[in-house]
Image (tube, rainbow, N blue to C red):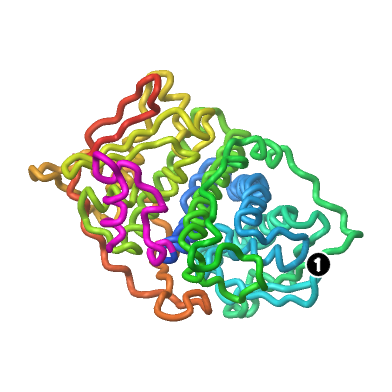
């Protein structure tokens, strides 16, 4: 059974009325989870250029520090509880990195060594983020690998042990230029280390609904691993997890992306008026939405039709997990409808899809057409446009092409995850440019708001 078939059969009444990760097979989930981790990491690739334009390189670095400080302690702890590996040692820190959108496997090829429960090292045999930034010059590399990494690594470790410190052995700018590994770090836990202060933005995100939302339980009776409570593995093999564990991991990874984006929005709002902050955040979301849709569709082998689009929407982190984003996706074979209501964790503006809430509530443009265009645009590059079934040009797609051309993510868009062997044993390198995905033959039709519904988007 294909991913699309499984999701289509999961609904009642309309086909695919109640789509979710649980409708995917275990095999498809094992493929999808590392894709979601990578797309979460690429959120910054979409947003940083706009921050540089607005605030300069230093301002960009400040927002990056704050967004990761604000989000990573909370989502790191969530994943520990979900997979049963809570602890206060180096192994717990390393397991968290393996399931963190800041360190997606292969793209960020972390290697680990544990000396004892309080001492260890990790290094990156390949760093996709560095490959993106190195062409910009040493100043940008220093901002990322020094200014941003120092406080954010410690913030992540804070979720495990407040006395943990992550310190560099060596790091870029690389000397010589081809130095490998790309960087190396020690992790030391010592009671004499002064715990880092929890920043106000970290405390603020800690009050968000996303931090406490209840996600799908893991069934210990399922075939496969229900947790990560055993020894640290050099490479996580997602196919070894049970179906219910993979569902929970996928939901947690999507929640990581919501929390990171909330941190991003919080940082931007400190430096810009509300209107400018929402514009920047919309641009960030527009840039990542289509790229994520493209990678999901390719990973699951979905068809280029409305049914394929329905499947993508059902597992897209912009609209997942369902426990946090109160939405419905309905497909009756001819008409696909996405409805986002005002319930769930998004009720107080705490979900990724809610960055336009204040403008929409004042009767001005709802941001959803732009995001819908980004999803329709997935796979269409270099001026390619979609046509609907009558042969008319897709209005939404044209809009997305005009506004989204500069959102191309660099290395991450072309990075291909290896699945032909142990999928996370080593960096697999870059493939040739992936085969371009044909357009979904659809046109974005409507976007409306009602007192009980934030927005409704319909494709025909």
Residue that sits furthest to the right in the current view: 192
Q: Is residue 143 left or right of residue 301?
A: right
Instruction: Estimate the x, y position of residue 42 in percent, counting from the top left.
Output: 48, 56
Query: x and y percent of residue 333 in the render?
Result: 18, 45
* Residue depicted at x 55% and y 74%: 126
446 relative to 134 in the view: left or right: left
- Name the residue rendered at 27%, 37% in the picture: 337
Q: Which residues are magenta?
A: 1-29
Q: Is residue 338 above or below residue 36?
A: above
Residue 16 shown in magenta? yes
- Residue 150 versus residue 198 in the image, above or below: below
Which one is nearer the viewer's eye here, 448 or 213? 213
Q: Position of residue 413 (x, y in %)?
A: 40, 62
Asked if residue 135 is among those painted magenta in the image, a careful observer would answer no
Picture quarter with the N terminus? bottom left
Q: Residues within 10 Å of mark 1 (few under 14, many from 20)?
A: many
Camera sees residue 191:
yes
Locate residue 372, reporting x and y percent: 32, 41
Disc 1 target residue: 188
Number of labels in the image equals: 1
Q: For residue 284, say whether it is visible.
A: no
x 42%, y 68%: residue = 415
Q: In which quadrant will I find the C terminus?
A: top left
Instruction: Describe the element under mark 1 as helix, strand or loop.
Output: strand
- Image quadrant of residue 382? bottom left
196 or 419, nearer to the observer: 419
In the image, 304: left or right of 56? Answer: left
Of 84 and 302, which appears nearest the observer?
84
Q: Residue at x 62, y 42 (%)?
A: 211
Most extreme residue toward the front, as rendered? 221
């Amino acid at each position: 059974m294909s991913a699309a078939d499984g999701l289509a059969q999961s609904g009642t009444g309309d086909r695919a009325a109640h789509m979710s990760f649980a409708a995917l097979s275990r095999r498809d989930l094992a493929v999808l989870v590392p894709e979601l981790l990578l797309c979460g990491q690429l959120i910054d690739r979409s947003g940083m250029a706009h921050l540089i334009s607005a605030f300069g390189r230093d301002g960009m670095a400040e927002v990056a520090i704050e967004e990761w400080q604000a989000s990573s302690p909370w989502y790191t702890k969530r994943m520990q509880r979900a997979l049963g590996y809570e602890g206060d040692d180096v192994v717990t820190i390393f397991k968290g990195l393996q399931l963190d959108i800041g360190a997606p496997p292969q793209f960020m090829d972390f290697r680990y060594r544990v000396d004892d429960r309080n001492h260890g090292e990790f290094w990156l045999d390949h760093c996709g983020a560095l490959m993106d930034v190195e062409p910009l010059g040493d100043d940008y590399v220093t901002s990322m690998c020094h200014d941003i990494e120092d406080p954010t690594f410690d913030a992540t470790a804070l979720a495990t042990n407040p006395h943990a410190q992550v310190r560099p052995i060596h790091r870029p700018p690389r000397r010589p230029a081809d130095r490998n590994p790309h960087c190396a770090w020690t992790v030391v836990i010592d009671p004499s280390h002064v715990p880092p202060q929890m920043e106000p933005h970290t405390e603020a995100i800690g009050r968000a609904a996303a931090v406490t939302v209840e996600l799908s339980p893991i069934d210990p009776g399922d075939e496969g691993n229900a947790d990560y409570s055993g020894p640290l593995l050099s490479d996580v093999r997602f196919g070894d997890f049970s179906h219910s564990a993979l569902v929970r991991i996928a939901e947690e990874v999507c929640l990581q992306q919501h929390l990171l984006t909330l941190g991003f929005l919080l940082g931007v709002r400190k430096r810009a008026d509300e209107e400018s902050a929402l514009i920047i955040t919309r641009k960030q979301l527009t840039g990542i939405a289509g790229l994520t849709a493209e990678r999901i569709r390719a990973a699951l082998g979905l068809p280029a039709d409305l049914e394929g689009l329905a499947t993508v929407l059902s597992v897209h982190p912009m609209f997942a997990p369902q426990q946090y984003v109160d939405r419905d996706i309905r497909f009756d074979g001819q008409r696909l409808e996405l409805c986002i209501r005002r319930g769930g964790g998004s009720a107080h503006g705490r979900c990724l899809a809610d960055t336009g809430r204040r403008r929409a509530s004042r009767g001005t443009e709802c941001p959803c057409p732009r995001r819908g265009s980004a999803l329709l645009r997935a796979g269409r590059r270099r001026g390619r446009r979609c046509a609907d079934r009558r042969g008319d040009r897709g209005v939404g797609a044209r809009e997305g092409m005009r506004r989204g051309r500069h959102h191309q993510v660099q290395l991450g868009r072309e990075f291909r995850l290896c699945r032909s062997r142990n999928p996370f044993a080593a960096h697999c390198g870059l493939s040739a440019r992936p085969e371009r995905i044909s357009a979904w033959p659809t046109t974005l039709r409507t976007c409306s708001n009602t007192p009980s519904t934030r927005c409704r988007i319909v494709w025909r």
